[in-house]
Amino acid sequence: MTLSATTDDRPRHAARAPRERGPKASAGTRLRGWLASTWFLVPALLLFLCFVLTPILVAFFTSFFKWGGFGFPDDFVGLDNFRGLAGDEVFRGDLWRGFLLVVLTLVLQLPLALATAVLLNQRMRGRAVYRAIFFAPFILSEVIAGVLFGIIFLPGNGLADTLVEDLPLLGGLAGKWFSDPDTALPTLIAVMTWKYFGFHMMIYLAGLQGIPKEVLEAASIDGAGAWRRFRSVTLPLLAPTLRISVFLSVIGTIQLFDLVWVTTTGGPTHATETMAVTMYEFGFKRYQMGYASAISVAMFVISMVFSLLYQRYALSRDLQGAVTSAGGRR
Amino acid sequence: MGIPHLPRRSFLTAVSAGAVLITAAPMLAACGGDDSGSGGKVTIEWMNIATTEPSQSLYPKIVKAFEAQNPNVTVKTTNLENEAFKSKMTALVASGDLPDIYVTWGGGVLKQQIDAGLVKDITSDGSKVLGTMTDVSKKPYQFDGKTYAVPYDMGMVGFWYNKKHFEKAGIDGPPKTWAEFMDAVRKLKDAGVTPIALGGKDKWPGHYYWSYLAMRIGGMQAMEQAAQSNDFSGAPFVQAGEKLKELSDLQPFQQGFQNAGYDTPGGQAATMGAGKAAMELMGQWAPAVQVDASGNELGDDLGWFPFPTVEGGPGAVTDVFGGGNGFAVSKDAPKEALDFLTFFMNEANEREQVTSGASMPVVKGAESALDDPNRKMVAEALNTSAGFQLYLDQAFPPAVGQEVNDSVASLIAGKKSAQEVTQAVTKVAKSQ
């Protein structure tokens, strides 16, 4: 598109307006256009091929082998690795925990982010400071956040224990947090919420800023109260932003690794293990690369199916022209 | 308008072509190997894990002395932290391009590398240096009568205990049998002391209990049989699980042990070092890590005793469970690599390594250089050992070792029964 704009000699509506210049010249220019665009695309394509497509294909390939990571995989086992996965309690647990994480993220983290965004979209003193504070955790690297919370939830004399010790209801939590299989996952969700809600808050803030004031004013004049304005004006107009944020959140949760690895390494007794952690365990601790590849393929398929379905049904209005939109171009 | 476009476009084409080359060149280069030529000079690549004192400053000293004696040889040292080293090795082994000399703990991991044809058999070439060493220290690196590494450190696992806490609980002398041990745990609990520090997050500290119990209940024979048949479902292993279950039912571990690391803040070593627990089952390095993790030295309060025997089990107190550090030489290493290792382990250097506390003795007679009573006890127990069993997570292929660690952690947490542990381990062992 951009290329055709630079070549004036190409007719705007080639299909409707018959070509006036000689077809030879036009074909030559077009070829040169193709060549130029190819050259521009090659670096990105090479990188994409070498670091994205090839690893994906290799993972698919090795997932059909029993392979320890040494030399060329030669022990073809067909679908055995996938059958193993289906029967593996830990992996099935991963799926359940992954589902739980996704759902809880959607019902806890995003509403919290939305509420904060709406609040901080109002005129108030120190609003920039609040925004910065809520956004700050997202800037922190996962590993640093993980180490920090490891110290905060340290059993015995950690900050969290000292805080809840004397409280009537939460007192029982002291010494548990990440150390007890029953409380580890909720603790992880709390840390995740702290870490990521600021990011979604920022997206929502940007979205809120794009809502024209006139519409809200008109609603006010029509007698709509605050809740009504939020329900009937803000929320529908924010919908594209919400859809993207849900999408990012789900995909991110499916692939969750670093925060878990640093805080609990998936324990105690697999209570916080995710698919990515299991994959790491099998790939780099047990050297069962074939099996680990099968896990990564499963993750890929789950993410892929979700993305395609989500793009097809939820994002179709936002992503005109994407592969999944049924009508094709426009 | 048509004419000025052409040069611009060809300019852009050239720029993008250049961009392609710049992007592609390093990628292509990365795919190929990078062999640097050498002219008379030999460079030995040495991958080590000496990131703490005293080895951190002692090893470069030895390297300098060696280079002074052999001016044509340069030793290029890479020091990595333990876990980083393991990750790096994963990548290096997969690429088949190992450093000339690298740290190994022997067992199943080394066996995998040997089977992949990456490690040099040094039985005859290294006979000079290997001949000076104790038999037990070489065991982890021997397969089918061949030796594949030069040991430089050797140790074993035993109970490190706080004498003050034992006194307070009214326990006279370290327990000799499992029943006495359980009794001691109860007494400690009654006295309000946390009996045992355990790093449950790291999992491997827990597997020591299960392995030692199996050794005591079934004897060395049971261990060898299991290793050969890949069958861990025998009675000794089930009973070991049951005994460990009995222990964990007493809730002897510190609060929150399930997410405690071994050497991290608030972990096993820190708890022990700070005097907040009475015992830990750990290798010869335990005292140093206790100080490092807690900033507190137990000093004379710290004592050591071997894992107690189990009544009725053929396993003797002289059967030891442990392992060491060794240096393996890769297949294509220059012969100077072995010369360096011979120099590294000569009498003077070994003495310095032992006295400085960098490692436990592996050369015969070097234990006389030890002055710390606890380390002396460990060295003596090693030298008088009857049977030797390498750490299970090293002795077997990684998948089996990790399954042992994982299943035993679940057993301690009460999420798996003794039978489920043996079934899970056997299933993985059989599939290898």
Image (cartoon, coloured by chain):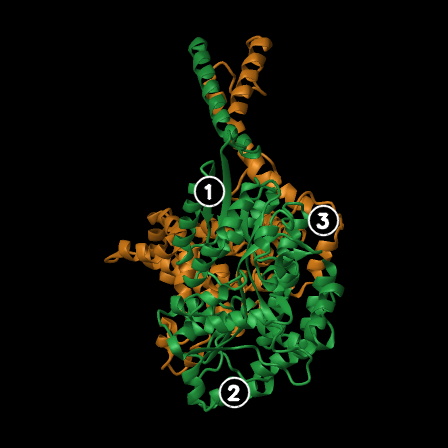
Drawing shade for chain A? orange
Residue A119, given in percent of the width and then of the height, sits at 33, 59
B308 vs A286, nearest the viewer: B308
Q: Residue furthest left?
A: A125
Q: Secondary structure at mark 1?
A: strand
Q: Secondary structure at mark 2?
A: helix
Q: How packed is label 3: few (under 14 Cα within 10 Å), some, or many (20 or more)?
A: many
Which label belongs to residue B31? Answer: none
Task: Say which quarter of the image contains residue B208.
Answer: bottom right
Q: Amino acid at mark 2?
A: Ala
What's the CA distance linking mark 3 and mark 2? Answer: 51 Å
| Above-or-below relation of B386 to B346 | below
Q: How packed is label 1: few (under 14 Cα within 10 Å), some, or many (20 or more)?
A: some
Give the residue drawn at x 42%, y 84%: B165
Q: Amino acid at mark 1?
A: Lys
- Name the residue carrying label 1: B76
Residue B356, given in percent of the width and then of the height, sits at 41, 61
- Name the residue carrying label 3: A65
Q: Secondary structure at mark 3?
A: loop
A327 vs A36, nearest the viewer: A36
What's the CA distance linking mark 1 and mark 3? Answer: 38 Å
B242 vs A184, nearest the viewer: B242
Q: Amino acid at mark 3?
A: Phe
Indicate the quadrant containing the N terminus of chain B: top left, top right, bottom left or bottom right. Answer: top left
Drawing shade for chain B? green
Residue A197 appearing in the image? no
The answer for which chain carries disc 1 is B
Which label belongs to residue B184? Answer: 2
Residue A249, given in percent of the width and then of the height, sits at 49, 54
| Above-or-below relation of B320 to B95 | below
